[in-house]
């Protein structure tokens, strides 16, 4: 992010959305989306307008007050960054507090793939995915980077109702309430388990597989192998991480939704989206699940720390490697760590900016290195501590972060507490400086940094 804004700043300066009642009509009108969003808003407006954003191919049809009165509005397609277009809606408010609005809109979704490779969100008879990355529901924001990032930070509760033709199934990460069926259509209802900052919706001809603790939405061609392999993998990796790092606060059943390849696996609070390769044949193909499940044991960090991606992606990447070592042995673990190293070296060869220290990843927008260099920090720390102490450290890190978001200072202090050892040199080598890079690059670069 370009702006150093905390969640507290946002709470003190903005209206915020408390609840969405979102109704979407998908695939019933060719490949056009029809949406209706009833939004509960908290906070007094300083002027007579509110601004919302939607995807640039979605057009607002009408906006009403809770009491039913129509409101005047303007909408305009604006460009925030190169090729990043949004529909900015300016709503003209009457006198008095506004606590609930209803916005109706329709249009198409075709993603932002030219800017963000994974954001291929679209409406398709084969597979549809709708995420806040494509602004498929209104967020409170203006068409500038600062406002968009603040609007996306908004945490809310939701009820979503998604109507699809038979035999399509709607998958989402919330609590499944039920489905209403007619001869041709069915409407799925999901409700948030807790406050969330995003809604993810997938539509396909899914098969649903349920166990006591897991609900899977799987493409039909992958159902058989899911029974045979994926559930086994999920159960044993949950068990491993819980044994080592304690129980995570996951809902039961935990939802796992298969998505098409290239759309980007991601972990939510109570669910994960997993690309097809996580469900395919092959001895190691399911190990990608370990990374996404590992996000359940990420410590909570403040907004500034999140930009480095160290406390989520470095942790998930190393936890994946830990699971591989447990289930497939040390050789496979070493191969995985070497793949991280090679990916990092390729980045360095492409741009020497990637040699900047981890603490500055957010500043230079190179946080993708947390996926690759980041795991070596945790591997070095576990080697220093030993497995039992490292486990205790991760547990302490997670528990502390529940009380307040942590940063690198907390990381160091908590590690020193469990180790009874000063870690200033370690932190300077791995987090604040570049000295530890020698361990990663010395076999590939000479003293001038050339191959």
Image (spheres, rainbow, N blue to C red):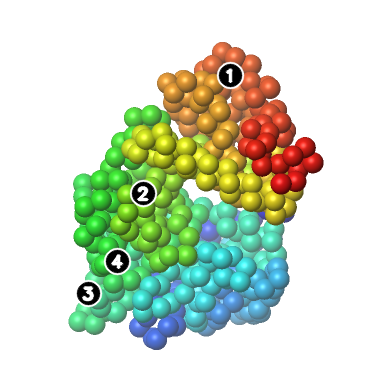
For numbered disc 4, what is the local secondary structure?
loop
Most distant residue in the bottom direction: 30
- The label on residue 317 is none
Mark 4 to mark 2 CA distance (whole Å)? 20 Å
> Where does residue 278 sit, x and y in percent of width and height?
36, 55
Q: Which residue is mark 2?
A: 284
Query: What residue is shown at x 30% (from left), y 57% (from top)?
Result: 281
Query: For the residues marked 1 and 3, what is the alpha-carbon distance in whole angstroms?
Result: 58 Å
Q: Which residue is mark 1?
A: 416
Give the mark nearer the N terminus: 4 vs 2.
Answer: 4
Q: CA distance from mark 2 to mark 3?
A: 40 Å
Q: Nearer the viewer, residue 278 or 139?
A: 278
Residue 219: give its label: 4
* Neighbours of disc 1 within 10 Å: few (<14), some (14-19), many (20+): some
Residue where numbered disc 3 is placed: 181
Mark 3, residues whose alpha carbon is within 10 Å: few (<14), some, or many (≥20)?
Answer: some
Q: Give the residue furthest to the top.
A: 420
Query: Looking at the rendering, which quadrant does residue 186 occupy?
Result: bottom left
Q: Which of pointers 1 and 3 lies earlier in the amino acid sequence? A: 3
SS for tag 3? Answer: strand
The quadrant in which residue 138 appears is: bottom right
Q: How far across and how far down the image is residue 402, in percent?
A: 49, 34
Q: CA distance from mark 1 to mark 2?
A: 36 Å
- Please rate how many residues cluster around mark 2, counting C-alpha atoms within 10 Å: few if below 14, some from 14 to 19, many from 20: few
Q: Is residue 314 left or right of residue 226?
A: right
């Amino acid at each position: 992010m370009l702006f150093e804004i905390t969640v507290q700043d946002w709470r003190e300066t903005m209206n915020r959305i408390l609840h969405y009642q979102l109704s979407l009509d998908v695939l019933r009108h060719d490949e056009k989306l029809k949406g209706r969003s009833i939004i509960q808003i908290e906070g007094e407006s300083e002027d007579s307008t509110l601004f919302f954003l939607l995807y640039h191919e979605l057009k607002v049809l009408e906006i009403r007050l809770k009491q039913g009165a129509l409101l005047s509005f303007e909408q305009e397609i604006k460009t925030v960054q190169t090729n990043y277009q949004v529909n900015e809606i300016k709503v003209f408010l009457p006198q008095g507090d506004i606590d609930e609005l209803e916005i109706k809109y329709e249009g198409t979704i075709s993603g932002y793939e030219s800017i963000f490779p994974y954001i291929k969100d679209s409406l398709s008879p084969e597979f549809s995915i709708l995420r806040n990355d494509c602004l498929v529901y209104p967020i409170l924001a203006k068409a500038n980077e600062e406002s968009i990032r603040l609007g996306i930070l908004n945490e809310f509760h939701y009820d979503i109702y998604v109507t699809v033709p038979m035999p399509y199934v709607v998958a989402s990460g919330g609590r499944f309430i039920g489905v209403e069926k007619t001869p041709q259509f069915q409407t799925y209802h999901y409700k948030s388990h807790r406050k969330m900052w995003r809604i993810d919706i997938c539509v396909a001809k899914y098969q649903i597989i349920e166990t006591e603790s897991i609900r899977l939405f799987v493409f039909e061609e992958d159902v058989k192998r899911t029974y045979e392999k994926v559930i086994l993998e999920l159960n044993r990796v949950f068990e491993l991480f819980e044994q080592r790092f304690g129980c995570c606060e996951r809902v039961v059943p935990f939802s796992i939704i298969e998505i098409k390849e290239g759309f980007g696996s991601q972990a939510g609070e109570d669910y994960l989206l997993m690309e097809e390769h996580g469900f395919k044949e092959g001895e190691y193909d399911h190990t990608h699940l370990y990374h996404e499940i590992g996000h359940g044991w990420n410590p909570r960090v403040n907004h500034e720390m999140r930009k480095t991606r160290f406390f989520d992606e470095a942790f998930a990447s190393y936890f994946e490697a830990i699971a591989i070592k447990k289930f497939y042995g040390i050789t496979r673990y070493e191969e995985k760590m070497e793949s991280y190293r090679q990916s990092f070296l390729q980045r360095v060869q492409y741009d020497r900016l990637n040699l900047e220290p981890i603490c500055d990843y957010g500043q230079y927008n190179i946080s993708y290195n947390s996926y690759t260099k980041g795991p070596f920090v945790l591997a070095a720390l576990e080697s220093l501590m030993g497995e039992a102490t490292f486990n205790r450290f991760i547990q302490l890190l997670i528990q502390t972060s529940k009380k307040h978001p942590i940063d690198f200072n907390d990381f160091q202090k908590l590690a020193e507490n469990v180790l009874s050892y000063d870690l200033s040199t370690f932190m300077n080598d791995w987090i604040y400086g570049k000295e530890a890079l020698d361990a990663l690059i010395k076999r590939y670069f000479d003293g001038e940094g050339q191959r």
